[in-house]
């Protein structure tokens, strides 16, 4: 009898333990997660080993991709810095709010009427911090601490916005690191430790806010030019200095994941890694004159174009989502997804309220993330300044530009955009052209009128 009772108790204990463990797992999945948004600057689709780079090693990002979701049709909101960041933080196409870059000479920024994701999450009880590049206005009322962020450490704009890189500036336009709303250190071209500095600040933010939900926006300044790497990472990559920079970034991602594990936060934190646009290919003369090698460039993989273009290489970028025990391992998603979609996604996860006073272009990806459902998006508009130059709708893409005229590509069959099929499918051209015109009218934007 005693033996039977012991066996019964063991079975009961095992059942209750498993049930309690399952309930704990469900509780973790259903609670509001921490959110870490890592936004690279000018990183190309083909810069990472897990996206096909043949020489640059990125073991930590490889592991994230293998244990999370790797996206193959993820679009930055724009192929230029400021507009892309405006789209990311507001969930709205940048033609609506910030179509062009800001700089040290700017007297404005992201319109004060715009609600940022930091505003939404802070209202929901999250601690909010940005480490890195801002680029949405440097005057006090436009800085992150006035736009929903509790803490800011980084650059108010791009790391090249100094003489001689930007010849329209003056000697008084110094490049300072800011802490909150105050400049604390001039860095100029001395940026060797910048990536590691940002990494240390990010880790400190996580440790400080680990007891409540937090939103960390880690916006690295590189591989935007001018690039530089810390001494311990120099000459380590077969990809030259550019490869050293990418491998340094990968190391910082490893440190980020490590601190989440050490603090018991890994299963409670969604980490999103992506880029604001593709890499520079045609370097401006002013950069070449300053000693940058003409072959210095990131990789767009199989795609044509680069930063500042509306070909795929301009805005199709690497993107990885990592959330152990919520995201199934080794998922590859080929659906159309964009940085605009992160705003409503983060808001939904935080149980926050979306703005209702204007249109939100982003679509929530919560079901894609948690239930492996398809993306709710089937189309993407490519904006350049206040002009709508292209649309992708399912597999078809139409470009309308002054330089290239009408171009129609089937991105499933021809992702490199080699073959213009506009003459073969005039009806498809007309359908997509009409959609561009409707969107341009809705956003008071322009479109080239090419028959």
Image (cartoon, rainbow, N blue to C red):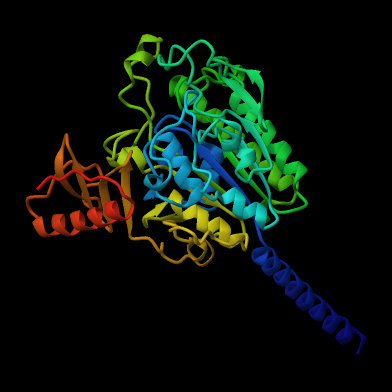
- Residue 53, position in %: x, y? 40, 35
Q: Looking at the image, which residue sits at the far left?
A: 423
Instruction: Quadrant for the N terminus, please.
Output: bottom right
Q: Residue at x 47, y 33 (%)?
A: 41
Q: Is residue 371 shown above or below 434? A: below
In this view, the residue in front, 97 or 399, is 97
Q: Is residue 202 left or right of residue 345?
A: right
- Residue 274, position in %: x, y? 48, 43
Which of the 4 image quadrants contains residue 325?
Answer: bottom right
Q: Residue at x 47, y 52 (%)?
A: 91
- Residue 292, position in %: x, y? 39, 14
- Residue 177, position in %: x, y? 62, 24
Q: Is residue 29 shown above or below 147? A: below
Which of the 4 image quadrants contains residue 304?
Answer: top left
Q: Looking at the image, which residue sits at the far bottom?
A: 1
Which of the 4 image quadrants contains residue 438?
Answer: bottom left
Query: What count of labels does the image hold?
Result: 0
Q: Residue at x 75, y 48 (%)?
A: 210
Regarding residue 352, the answer to whether it shows in the image is yes
In this view, the residue in front, 3 or 235, is 235
Q: Is residue 416 left or right of residue 278?
A: left
Q: Is residue 45 shown above or below 162? A: below
Regarding residue 326, the answer to whether it shows in the image is no
């Amino acid at each position: 009898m005693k033996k039977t009772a012991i066996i019964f108790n063991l079975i009961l204990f095992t059942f209750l333990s498993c049930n309690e463990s399952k309930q704990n797992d469900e509780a973790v999945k259903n609670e509001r997660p921490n959110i870490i948004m890592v936004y690279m600057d000018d990183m190309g689709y083909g810069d990472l080993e897990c996206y096909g780079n043949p020489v640059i090693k990125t073991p930590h990002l490889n592991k994230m991709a293998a244990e999370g979701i790797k996206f193959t049709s993820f679009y930055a909101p724009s192929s230029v810095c400021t507009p892309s960041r405006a789209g990311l933080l507001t969930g709205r196409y940048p033609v609506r709010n910030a179509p062009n870059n800001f700089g040290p000479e700017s007297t404005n920024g992201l319109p004060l009427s715009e609600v940022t994701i930091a505003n939404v999450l802070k209202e929901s009880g999250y601690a909010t911090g940005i480490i890195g590049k801002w680029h949405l206005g440097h005057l006090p009322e436009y800085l992150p601490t006035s736009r929903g962020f509790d803490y800011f450490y980084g650059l108010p704009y791009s790391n090249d916005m100094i003489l001689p890189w930007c010849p329209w500036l003056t000697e008084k336009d110094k490049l300072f690191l800011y802490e909150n709303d105050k400049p604390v250190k001039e860095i100029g071209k001395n940026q060797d430790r910048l990536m590691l500095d940002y990494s240390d600040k990010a880790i400190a933010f996580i440790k400080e806010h680990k007891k409540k939900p937090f939103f960390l926006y880690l916006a690295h300044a590189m591989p935007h030019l001018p690039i530089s790497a810390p001494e311990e990472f120099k000459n380590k990559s077969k990809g030259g200095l550019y490869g050293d920079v990418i491998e340094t970034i990968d190391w910082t991602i490893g440190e980020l994941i490590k601190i989440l594990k050490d603090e018991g936060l890994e299963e409670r934190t969604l980490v999103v890694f992506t880029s604001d646009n593709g890499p520079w290919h045609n370097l401006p003369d002013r950069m070449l004159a300053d000693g940058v090698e003409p072959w210095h460039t990131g990789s767009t993989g199989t795609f044509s174009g680069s930063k500042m273009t509306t070909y795929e290489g301009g805005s199709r970028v690497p993107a990885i989502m990592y959330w152990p025990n919520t995201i199934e391992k080794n998922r590859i998603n080929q659906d159309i997804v964009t940085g605009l979609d992160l705003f409503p996604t983060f808001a939904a996860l935080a149980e926050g309220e979306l703005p209702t006073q204007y249109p939100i272009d982003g679509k929530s990806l919560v079901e894609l993330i948690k239930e492996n459902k398809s993306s709710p998006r089937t189309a993407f508009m490519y904006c350049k300044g206040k002009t709508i130059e292209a649309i992708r709708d399912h597999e078809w893409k139409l470009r309308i530009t002054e330089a290239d005229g009408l171009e129609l590509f089937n991105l499933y069959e021809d992702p490199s955009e080699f073959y213009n099929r506009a003459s073969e499918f005039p009806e498809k051209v007309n359908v997509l052209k009409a959609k561009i015109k409707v969107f341009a009218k809705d956003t008071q934007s322009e479109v080239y009128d090419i028959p």
